[in-house]
Image (cartoon, rainbow, N blue to C red):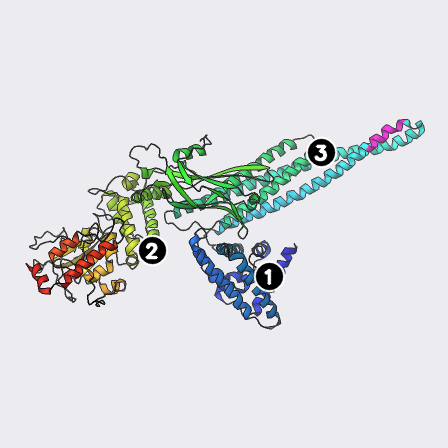
Amino acid sequence: MQWSSWMDKRCQTLKIHTSSSHLSAAEPGMALWIQAQQLQGDALHQMQSLYGQHFPIEVRHYLAQWLEAQPWDAIDLENQLDEFKAKRLLEGLIQELQRKAEHQMGEDGFLLKIKLGHYATQLKSSYDPCPLELVRCVKHILYTEQRLVQEASNASSPGSVPVDGTPQRYQQINQAFEELRVMTQDTDNDLRKLQHSQEYFIIQYQESLRIQAQLSSLASLPPAERVQRESGLQSRKSTLEAWLTREANTLQKYRQELAEKHQRTLALLRKQQTVIVDDELIQWKRRQQLAGNGGPSEGGLDILQAWCEKLADMIWQNRQQIRRVEHLTQQLPIPGPTEELLTELNATVTDVISALVTSTFIIEKQPPQVLKTQTKFSATVRLLVGGKLNVHMNPPQVKATIISEQQAKALLKNENTRNDSSGEILNNNCVMEYHQTTGTLSAHFRTMSLKRIKRSDRRGAESVTEEKFTVLFESQFSVGGNELVFHVKTLSLPVVVIVHGSQDNNATATVLWDNAFSEPGRVPFVVPDKVLWPQLCEALNVKYKSEVTSDRGLSEDNLVFLAQKAFSSSSNNPEDYCNMTITWSQFNRESLPGRNFTFWQWFDGVIELMKRHLKAHWNDGAILGFLNKQQAQDMLMSKPNGTFLLRFSDSEIGGITIAWVAENPNKAGERMVWNLMPFTTKDFFIRSLADRISDLNHLLFLYPNQPKEEVFSRYCTPSNSKAVGDGYVKPEIKQVVKVEFSSPNPEPSSGNSFMEHAASPTVNQHHNFTIYPSITAGSRGAEGAAVVLPCRGAQEKIRNESMLDTEGEFDLDETMDMARQVEEFLRQPMETQWSGQQS
């Protein structure tokens, strides 16, 4: 009570300062703190309890605007690389405190100046060795304040919508907790009455024993005296025995009523626990799984932990009450049904607390679901009720083991697995740490590594990238002075183990299908073999937007195109696909007709291309992408010459092509659509898409009618034609095609324009010109990207030189070799160069 009263006074003082100081309530950055100060009752006390020596409430008050404006959420507490960002925030906090102290004036200002300076020194001393702990502390404070303010807002405005859009559910949970609090307080009061009544009963019972002893001692007295005294004692004895009989029945009734009240309390506790653990926590886990596919973040665990801790507190209080009743019963046995009922209650409350503890041992940060051997990875497990049950007083150790799908099934059936594992994880033991500032008990595995994996016999057509494993985390600890010992276990989301990066694509397909379509409570790791097409569309759209980090997702037309590809269909009607199902085999086991890759491999190739090189163009709407050749032709033939669009290649994984409409150079008056051979990610490592489009003078308008400069110029690389110190001109790579095109507004060009790709096969015309082989500059061949070298000998020489290694990175030596060849060529007299080409 002293602490609470002191904090009340401090908050009241700070409220007075708010109205009188220069920190105006109108400042938008202070909105949360101003609302937090309006909290009342239990919510206010919860808010006040957030502060102490680890973070004084005065710091929160006087730096409210600054604190709420900082990017605390941008720092990953598990990433040691973010420690530098945390350090900068700590330094900023100290500087703000010192600046605030320096500006204090007057008598009160002098005291505040000293106090703020002291806090600056104190915080620097506390958090300088571990700045991430400051971030953890402030994030917890801001999140809890926001939750308390939101709950208070929901309570006063039933129609308002909280952060997660579920006001009714939150209100019901809070109302149930209030009901449980009242019931627990009621049984505690009844227990006190019972104890008082029993103590008085024992006193009276002892009095009856004393009277009986006195009666027994009367035999030694003279008869007259004995009769006189015996009469009075017998009368007192009879009266007392009658009272004891009535009181014994009353005590038995009290015990029975109290036991029945505990039954009702435990029933409500079970119901509340079901709502929180089986509904809210399961939904959080489901959101966590969908987040693995790129869905929205699962959200923080603070509110769930607060609920679970309330549950643990109330369950433990009721357990202690039941045990006290048992003690009273043993102290004064009274025959009746209460003893059996108490035994049942004790077993029930133990089951409830056991279920809560084992259910709240969860994985806060999942290990990567595509796990490569010999590669470091991390994970975090957390016990939501650890702080409330004081588990940290003897910190438990957590062990991580990788097990197979069959071993996971056996584990959940409580079958003896003989401690089997399916591989060896290095650095797989970690002690749970208690974080005082947030009240969380967790174990952070930071440097685990899968040394080896033992695979099981695969079924049918199943490949290694379809085999699922899981990381098992287990620990053991006791609570209540070793009254209860818990062995807790939890399984990670399914993990696909790969040994080479080339397996990542197919492993990701397995994970995406499992995350999207698994159901809560399934047998590990059962997942439907086929799903409705709209379900897969939703999963693909979420994955695409997440990977490309774009708000522009897949449109209805895009999804129709994908349906046509997946089902080899020609229908353009979206409704035709609504009730169609797609199987796992169609998704990523069977190759598309006429191709050597699956539907997912093609789609994943598009994702990789977009997120590596073309994200900005997709966000700008410059890439239509999901079109076939015929659709592109139909769209372009109605547009002026020089109109072009960008579509994804049907024939190559991760390829994008430029289609444009132009005159047929071999037949006057005829127009046709041309398609460049697809560019892939390796091509864009050499020259960007914007630069390539800028190089091609015959491309004028991006479909439907945007001048290309408006769309692409800001992404182009500035030209560098200045001579270097030794007098030589630096060569540049340019995009060319090998057939001349006339355009309404031809742009100046430094050399001839060449066409190196065949015309669209949809135009059935015979052309009397030579299609030259590609001048490539990549390991696959950067079709359409070339140094402008008309000399064919030099072209062939460069084509055979690779500027990229197998991983798509520049090889400096080979790049310099090519540059020297270009330089030698440019030294030749111009007449020699062109005469060789014209011959």
The amino acid beneath tag 2 is Ser
- In x, y percent, where is residue 1? 65, 54
Q: Quadrant of residue 465?
A: top left
Of the two numbered discs 2 and 3 on the same chain, state the one appearing first in sequence.
3
The amino acid beneath tag 3 is Leu
Return the residue found at the far front.
Answer: 726
Q: Secondary structure at mark 1?
A: helix
Q: CA distance from mark 2 to mark 3?
A: 72 Å
Which quadrant is home to the C terminus? bottom left
The residue range painted magenta reads 210-219
**Residue 279 in magenta stretch:** no
Q: Is residue 115 left or right of residue 381?
A: right
**What residue is pinned by disc 2?**
550
Q: CA distance from mark 3 to mark 1?
A: 50 Å
Between disc 3 and disc 1, the foreground one is 1
**What residue is pinned by disc 1?**
11
- In x, y percent, where is residue 229? 89, 32
- The number of numbered discs placed on residues in the rendered structure image is 3
Of the two numbered discs 1 and 2 on the same chain, state the one appearing first in sequence.
1
- In x, y percent, where is residue 416? 46, 30
Between disc 2 and disc 3, the foreground one is 2
**What residue is pinned by disc 3?**
332
Relative to 408, say whether 142 is above or below. below
The amino acid beneath tag 1 is Cys
Q: Secondary structure at mark 3?
A: loop
